[in-house]
Image (cartoon, rainbow, N blue to C red):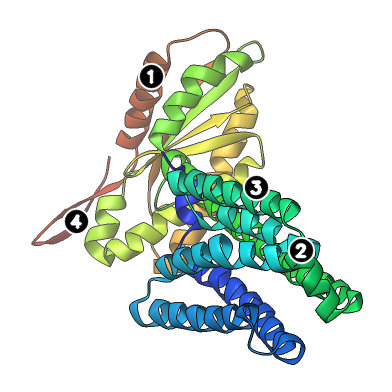
Amino acid sequence: MEDTFEKEYYADNTTQKIYLIFVITSLVANILGAVSNVFIFGMSITTIVCFSFIAIILVATIFGRVFKKYDVAMSIAAFLICAIEFPFLYFSYRISALPYLVLGIYAASIIYKGRAKVAMLSIFATIYVIIIAVGFVYPDYYDEIVEASGSVSMIISGLVSGIITTITVALTINIVIYNYVNKNNEYIELNKRLERMNHYDSLTPCYNRKFLMDYLQTNCNVRTNNGLSIVLFDIIDLGYINFKYGYTVGDQVLAEFADIVFATLKGRGIVARYDGQKFVAILYVTVQEEINKIINAVLDEFKKFSEKIKNDKFNVSYGVTICRSNFSVDDELKIVYARSLDNARKLPHRVFSDEGLMNQGE
C-alpha cells in the first residue's frame, strides 16, 4: 500500500516537472547521438535508433500534453528508452554508454510506483545483466565501432553520456527534495491548524472548553503544592449588547474582553472561553490581594473599552476560588460559577424584548 507521501509526490505538477527533465535530457542525448552518428557512420542502425527515439519522445510528449496524462506518457517513454534504447547503446558503445544503464535503474526507481516500480527495476536489471554479459562474450562489434570512430570519439561519447546522466539525476533529486520540503511544510501548517481547532476558541485567542478541562484534569495537580486560583468572568450584558448593537458588535466585545484578560495576566496564567459569554482564567496566584488586582484591572480596562466603543457600560460578574491541594475540578467549577451568579445579582442589568430595552436595578 502506497504511503501518503508517495501519493502526494506523484501529483500532476511534480510528474510534469520530472517528465520535462527526462524529455529534455533524452532529446539532447538522442540529437547529439544522431548527428554525430550521421557524420561518423552515416545512416547506420545506431543512427536510425537515435532518430526513432526522438520521434517516440515527441509523440509521448504530445500525448501527455493533449490528454493531460503525463504519468502515462512518462511511464511508456521511460520503458521504451530504458528497456530498448539504453541496452542497444551499451551493446554498441559499451563502457562509454554505461552511465545510461545507471540512469535506467535510477529512472525506474523514481518514475514508477508501488508494484510497477519493483517490476520495472527487475526487468531493467535483468536486461542490463544480459546485455553486459553478451557484450563481454561477443566483443567484436564493439571493437569495430572503436576502430571506425576512434578512441577519442568514444571518450567524448562517454563524457557526454556521463554529463547527461549526472544532470538528469541531480535535477530529479532536486525536485524530490523541493517537493518533500514543500509537503512537509504543508503538513506542519495543517497540524498547527488542526491543533488550533482542537485547542483554541474559534472567535477569540482563548483556549476552548475542551482544552481547559483537559488542562485542569491533567496539569493542575502539578501546581497544587503552590496553589492556583480559578476565576470565572461572565459578560452578563452580552444578550443586551447583541440585541441593541447587533451580533457583530457582540463578537467584537467578546474578542476584546479576551484580549484584555490576556494582557492583564502577563504570563501569570491561562484563559479559556468556557461557553458563550463566560471566560475562565487559571491563575498561578493564590494571594487574594493579587487576585483582586488582576480582576479589577480586567474590569477597568473593559469599562474603558465599552465607554469608548458605544459610550455604554457593559457589566461583567465574576467568581473566584483558590485551590491549594488536590481538588475536584467539577466541584471547584461549580463553586466559582455559583459565586459569579451571586456577584451578578448585585449588578444592574438590562431586560430586553421585542418592545424595547429597560434598565433594571438590583
**Circles 2 and 1 in contact, beta carbons < 8 Å:** no
Type of residue at label 3? Val
Please state, as top left, top right, bottom left or bottom right, where the N terminus lies in the image: top left
From the top left corner, tell me how far across and down residue 59 is, in percent. Answer: 44, 82
Q: Which residue occupies 43% across, 70% down?
A: 73
Q: Of label 2 and label 4, which has the lower sequence position?
A: 2
Type of residue at label 1? Ile
Type of residue at label 4? Met
Q: Between 163 and 43, which is closer to the camera in this rendering?
A: 43
Please state, as top left, top right, bottom left or bottom right, where the C terminus lies in the image: top left
**Label 2 sits on residue:** 140
Q: Of label 3 and label 4, which has the lower sequence position?
A: 3
Q: Tell me the quarter of the picture where residue 361 sits.
A: top left
Q: CA distance from mark 2 to mark 3?
A: 19 Å
Q: Is residue 238 left or right of residue 95?
A: left
Q: Is residue 58 visible?
A: yes
**Label 1 sits on residue:** 335
What kind of element bears circle 1?
helix
**Circles 2 and 3 in contact, beta carbons < 8 Å:** no
Q: Which residue occupies 58% across, 11% down?
A: 324
**Circles 3 and 4 in contact, beta carbons < 8 Å:** no
